[in-house]
Amino acid sequence: MVPSLAAADWKMNLQQPNSAIAQQMFDLHTLITVVCVVIFFAVFGVMFYSLYAHRKSSGRKASQFHESATVEALWTIIPFFILLVMAFPATKAVLDMRDTSAPEMTIKVTGYQWKWGYDYIHEGFGYVSTLATPLAQIKNGETKGENYLLEVDNPLVVPVGKKIRVLITANDVLHAWWVPALGVKQDAIPGFIRDAWFRADRPGIFRGNCAELCGKEHGFMPIVVEVKTQADYDIWLAAQKDKYGVGKTINAVAVVDSKVYTRDELVAHGKTVFEGAGGCQGCHQATGKGIAGQFPALDGSKLVNGPKLDQITLLLNGKAGTAMASFKHLSDKDLAGVMAYTRSSWSNKAVEFAQPIDFAKARNGGVLPAGAVAAAAVADKAVASTEVGVLSAKVYFANGQKELPSNAKGSIDAALASLKGQHGKKIDITGYTDKAGDRVANLGLAKERAIAVRDALEAAGVKRDQINMKPPGEVAGGADNKEARRVDINLAA
């Protein structure tokens, strides 16, 4: 009995139906279960009776018979009529299930790895629904909530009593949109649009899941449908239209986050987005190494370390034919934070980083709506001032080696980019060594490494008089300490 104490739920039947189709499914399930139970008792009843009544110990003698036409007719005709009894309601349920004609609302549902997109086609807006269960609960750092892994940030909201047609597709791999209480289960297939429908009988919150194995976080893309009364739905709909600017005139003032954040502020904010539920960490890993053959590494990525516009475009639009979906549902600050975090973490040392206003521009084809232009001009000037002096590139050498490593190009390019357009600016180069062993030899090695970096900068086009060679620095610890084998490249004060 002890294991039974750990059982979370003893429910042994389907969910309580909340639509006509779900009720038909429930009734059909009950009917077939009853038929199966009757057949079970009838067949095993006859079998056990025959075994008992005709046993040898009671003096019975075995009968010899073969090919009884009567028996064969009975066990063919009776199952045929049983199947007819089950087929009639089953066929009616399937036909009703597929009848999506004359809907009162149409909503497009798109499956992504791993979230759901909902577009209210005739209302002019849409949004993305992602898992809302805190990461701490998933990692057993907090007590699991009542709706653990079955809660989302933005549920699908519909009015009660209306026939809702859902057009279901997928952006990347197979998914399936399944809400048992509403009698809906339909595969979401990339490149195809399938439809289904439901009409909720009463208000409430109804939960489901993706029912098609779609990847490593398949179990983390729940579905929540919130059914409201018509009056409450109208209030919600008006709020959503206002939120997404539906029906507003073109001259309306756009709300743009024009604040200029420091790199540290964006990195700190981006870290929470990257590691949060439904964030980048699920695919690209906390180490930024990704998963070989599935999700590319961010650590050392040419795109992450390259021009900021390329990464802005990828975050907003995704990449067709891959698992990289669009993240335009995130706020401009969230996107700018994630971008700053990925460009400043692991071995990445990108010079450029984006501000929220950069994403606001990109969303609108590079031009902000009227009313936000003045704020953009102020922000652009502030961004330019924050990007002066942000260079802090590092080149790490192999243990005991003075030859420039092959991965130093990113740091050299960063130095060139920071000097561009800044007349009179110079670069400080500082080699480091450890305090263990022969101090003179160590300092000499640090100096030779700094010279190797200087020569690479000169070869890339930096003039000798733009380079300041600083005295070597010392780091506590042996030569196996990575920081004791580095050369720093900084903009001179």
Image (cartoon, helix red, strand yellow):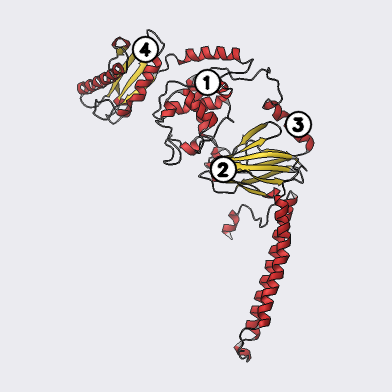
Q: Residue at x 62, y 92 (%)?
A: 59
CA gap between label 1 and label 2 equals 34 Å
Q: Give the residue type that dot 2 points to.
A: Pro
Q: Residue at label 4? A: 492
Q: Residue at label 1? A: 355
**SS state under label 3:** helix
CA gap between label 1 and label 3 equals 34 Å
Of the two numbered discs 1 and 2 in the rendering, the one whose residue sits closer to the viewer:
2
CA gap between label 4 and label 1 equals 25 Å
Q: Position of residue 485 (x, y in %)?
A: 29, 26
> In the rendered structure, which disc, 4 or 1, sits on the residue that comes first in sequence?
1
Of the two numbered discs 4 and 2 in the rendering, the one whose residue sits closer to the viewer:
2
Of the two numbered discs 2 and 3 in the rendering, the one whose residue sits closer to the viewer:
2
| Nearer to me, 441 or 456 | 456
| Nearer to me, 29 or 312 | 312
Left or right, 80 with reference to 265: right
Q: Residue at label 2? A: 190
Labels 3 and 4 touching (C-beta < 8 A): no
Query: Can you tell which quarter of the image residue 76 is in?
Result: bottom right
Labels 1 and 3 touching (C-beta < 8 A): no
